[in-house]
Image (spheres, rainbow, N blue to C red):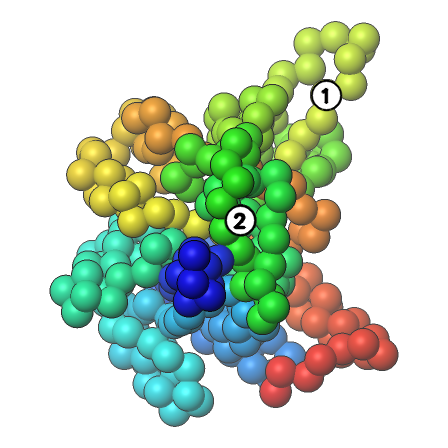
Amino acid sequence: MTDNAKSNRLRPVVCGVIPARLESRRLPRKPLRLICGRPMIAWVYERAALSTAFNSLLIATDSGEILEYCTRTGIPARLTSSVHASGTDRLIEVLDEDCSSRQSADVYVNIQGDEPMVTAEHIRLLLGPFCNDADRVETAGDGRVGLDGTGGGSLTAVQVSTLKVAISSKEAQDPNIVKVVTDCRGRALYFSRTAIPFNRGDSVRARYYKHLGFYAYTVEALRRFRALPPSALEQTECLEQLRFLENGIPIGVLETSDDTIGVDTEHDLERVQEYFTKLASAPSFVNLG
């Protein structure tokens, strides 16, 4: 195998998309709300851009105001339709445009625009299941997640990946926190706003995991998602990822120790503001401004 062929196999083409809708019922103008003096969307983009895994990274928005801000500050962005029901639908529009110009990626990563605490490690974990040996994630010299070609990984058939983080039983009772349970191979069994699993007795201590709103998809998974109607469980729980599970599309779930605060309310925004204020005073802080 030539060095170029090996290099190509080591480097799947990865596109990162940050869906950003201006209006939110609980927190109006959310992407442009300030965190330490800078719009939240800038924090999300610049922290995601610390990952070396992306061949491209952009904002996908329905807002001319967000697009104008991105253009003015040098953040790649595209204007997308205002009718999309979810961030996944907005990402699929980006995929369609890429396919039309014959520039589609192998893997698309969805970084929600209200997740300013995203890290490069989150991205690395998301891309792990797309390696031929998911239990042996290797990196090329430039830090990109690699495909080592050995086969046999426990998540090799996964078409979608996402993340989880351990939480307390008290946190698990909050319906605003989405919980996930997985099988022995790390594949999602179910996502829910209720506390799962239900702990019926005291003989076994239940372990609870919060689902973090980051995804990586193959192109085929995104096409299948679009072709399928919204599923019953998806509509019941208001969780779009259940459409994949109800239709037999596996989701690999990787565990991280780095929790995030998804910004949905004023209280969330205050907590994130406090987090970055403390982070800025730490000796190792990297100033993104």
The Cα atoms of the two marked residues, 1 and 2, are separated by: 36 Å
Residue depicted at 34% across the width and 25% down the height:
248
The residue closer to the viewer here, 29 or 67, is: 67
Disc 2 on helix, strand or loop?
loop
Dividing the picture into quadrants, the one containing residue 2 is: bottom left
Report whether 191 appears left or right of 166: left
Report whether 132 appears left or right of 65: right
Residue depicted at 72% across the width and 48% down the height:
257
Asked whether the viewer can see residue 217, the reply is: yes
The residue closer to the viewer here, 251 or 39, is: 251
The kind of residue on which mark 2 rests is Asp
Residue at the farthest front position: 1
Report whether 21 appears left or right of 47: left
In the picture, the quarter occupied by the N terminus is bottom left
First-in-chain label (1 vs 2): 2
Q: Residues within 10 Å of mark 2 (few under 14, many from 20)?
A: some
Identify the residue position indicated by label 2 in the image: 148
- Residue 63 is labelled as none
Residue 120 against residue 129 in the figure, above or below: below
Dividing the picture into quadrants, the one containing residue 20 is: bottom left
The residue closer to the viewer here, 32 or 123, is: 123
